[in-house]
Amino acid sequence: MDPGHLVGRVEDGFRFERLVGTGGIGEVYEAVRVSDNARVAIKTLLPTFRDVREAVRRLEREARAGGLLDHPNIVDIQAYGVLADGMPYLVMELVDGIDLGAALEHGALEPRRALAIGRQTLEGLAHAHTHGVLHRDLKPENLMLAATADGERVKILDLGLAKLVGFAAEGSAKLTETGAIFGTPAYMAPEQALGRPVTFATDIYAVGVIVFEMLTGKVPFIGADVQGTLRLHVKGTIPRLVDVAPWCPPALDQIITQALQKEPAARFASASRMAAALHVIERSLAA
């Protein structure tokens, strides 16, 4: 079976209308729930991963994590099910917009927009962290920018690598053991790169990388290869935002520098504190 093979079919009460996109192991469709004609997004695995147990568990983990959360900056996961052929799927809200990765293809963003995106991301994370959910794979492609009547709204996607802090171990699906590396190299905190235990500060580091990229058009650490990038996260000198973006207020430079500290304890104590710090700069730029 090829990606997109569900288009045009009615399965388990949903009419699959078009393939929205594909990722490493999954694909997302726009669909209509037949019972009420509601438009939704449905995430399934690529056909070749249907019988791969860890891929199935990743989708189950996303459903479990999403079920704990209810926040305007986190995509709403509505249901989990299994199609007739055994393919698991998630039903999610359909977000009208583009992902941040696509927005960054044209270079750095306008500062106020970048700070608003960073703040909203942190506000969503603060809610997730309060409910014991650590994302672990934040990157521009996992942040949707939705157009709403109140302006642009961030929607955090893909909780497939989420760690549920304080919950019982998940057997072989447990992703917390030392030595295991999960995430996307350009956005990985030093402790991730080293395979060490992760904390909520790991997500804060990733947001620091993303905000730096939004303001400058490039990530702070990029090596010649994956291992080179990971080494820079662990041992590289933290670049100063003011050296790349001279317009940057010193306070904003300090915020990003703190978020990118090598030691988790040296970063912001919480996502909400970093969000509040960015909001101060955001309001000053609007004055």
Image: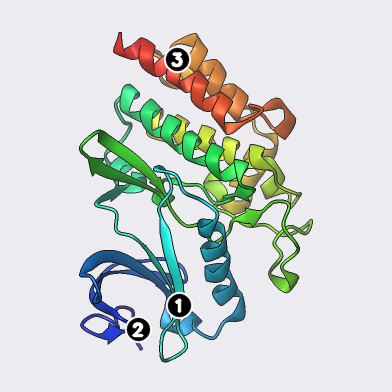
x 43%, y 60%: residue? 77
The residue beneath circle 1 is: 81
CB under 8 Å between callouts 2 and 1?
yes
The residue beneath circle 2 is: 12
Tell me, what colour scheme is on the image? rainbow
What's under tag 1, amino acid-wise? Gly
Residue 186, given in percent of the width and then of the height, sits at 53, 45
x 29%, y 58%: residue? 94
Crowd band around label 3 with a 10 angstrom C-alpha radius: few (<14), some (14–19), many (20+): few
Residue 104, given in percent of the width and then of the height, sits at 32, 40
Q: Residue furthest right?
A: 178
**Pick the front one: 120 or 230:** 120
Crowd band around label 1 with a 10 angstrom C-alpha radius: few (<14), some (14–19), many (20+): some
x 67%, y 48%: residue? 192
Rounded to the nearest angstrom, the CA distance separating label 2 from label 3 is: 48 Å
The residue beneath circle 3 is: 280
CB under 8 Å between callouts 2 and 3?
no
What's under tag 2, amino acid-wise? Asp
